[in-house]
Image: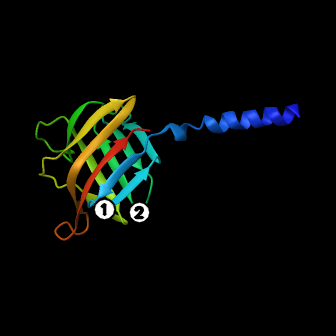
Amino acid sequence: MKPLILCSVLIVLLTGCDKSNNRKYSTWTVNGTETFSTKQVTASVDCDSNQNDCRSVLQSNDDNNSFLIIFPVDYFPTSGYYFLNYWGVSTGITNYCFVSFVYNNQKYFHPQRAMDTLYADSDAQARYTLSPTWFLNENAPAEDSILVEGVFNEP
């Protein structure tokens, strides 16, 4: 009887400590009608061998409907506004990020000259808020666009 109780307690403790259950959902809405929500988000910081060229990547892991957020720094920002998709543009702007989406297996990107922002704040982990923003289809930017808003959480 004691081994059974001990085993039961151990199983409850191990399953209760699942770190993925503590993750916050990242949720986004497309065109005001379709909402996607996931805890399956990865966060990584990648740097070159000299630690000079770094980027922080937050992304969901679904081939059909997903998001990708990249900051050109070696950490996840926790405050302020970041201009969307000024990646590699020499404008003097230092607070920028790259944001894209996959929606129904199609890739969408933010128009280069639009001045939209992503807001960063923190509640123990980084959280990014996107106000309603237009994204263009990678293969047909003049014919297809989506309006996206959401909250994206660092796992």
Q: Which residue lies at the image location 39% right of the left edge and 46% below the top edge?
A: 26
Please tell me in which quadrant of the rendered image residue 7 appears.
top right
**Mark 2 and mark 1: Cα distance apart in space:** 17 Å
Residue 115: percent from left, percent from top: 13, 47
State the residue in front, 153 or 46.
153
- Going by the numbered disc 1, the residue's amino acid type is Thr
- Going by the numbered disc 2, the residue's amino acid type is Asn
Q: Earlier in the sequence, mark 2 or mark 1?
A: 1
Q: Secondary structure at mark 2?
A: loop
Foreground: disc 2 or disc 1: 1
* Residue 87 horizontal side relative to residue 128, left or right: left
Q: Which residue is mark 1?
A: 33
Residue 52: percent from left, percent from top: 30, 31
Instruction: Reply above or below: 12 against 143.
Output: above
Instruction: Reply above or below: 136 against 60.
Output: below
Q: Which residue lies at the image location 21% right of the left edge and 46% below the top edge?
A: 84
Residue 136: percent from left, percent from top: 22, 61
Q: Which residue lies at the image location 36% right of the left edge and 36% below the top edge?
A: 48
Please tell me in which quadrant of the rendered image residue 79 appears.
top left
In the rendered image, the quadrant that contains the C terminus is: top left
Q: Secondary structure at mark 1?
A: loop
Say whether residue 74 is visible.
no
Q: Which residue lies at the image location 17% right of the left edge and 55% below the top edge?
A: 111
Instruction: Reply above or below: 80 against 145.
Output: above
Which dot marks residue 101? none
Classify mark 1: residues with Cα within 10 Å, few (<14), some (14-19) or many (20+). Answer: few
Which dot marks residue 64? 2
Q: Are marks 2 and 1 in contact (CB under 8 Å)?
A: no
**How many numbered marks are there?**
2
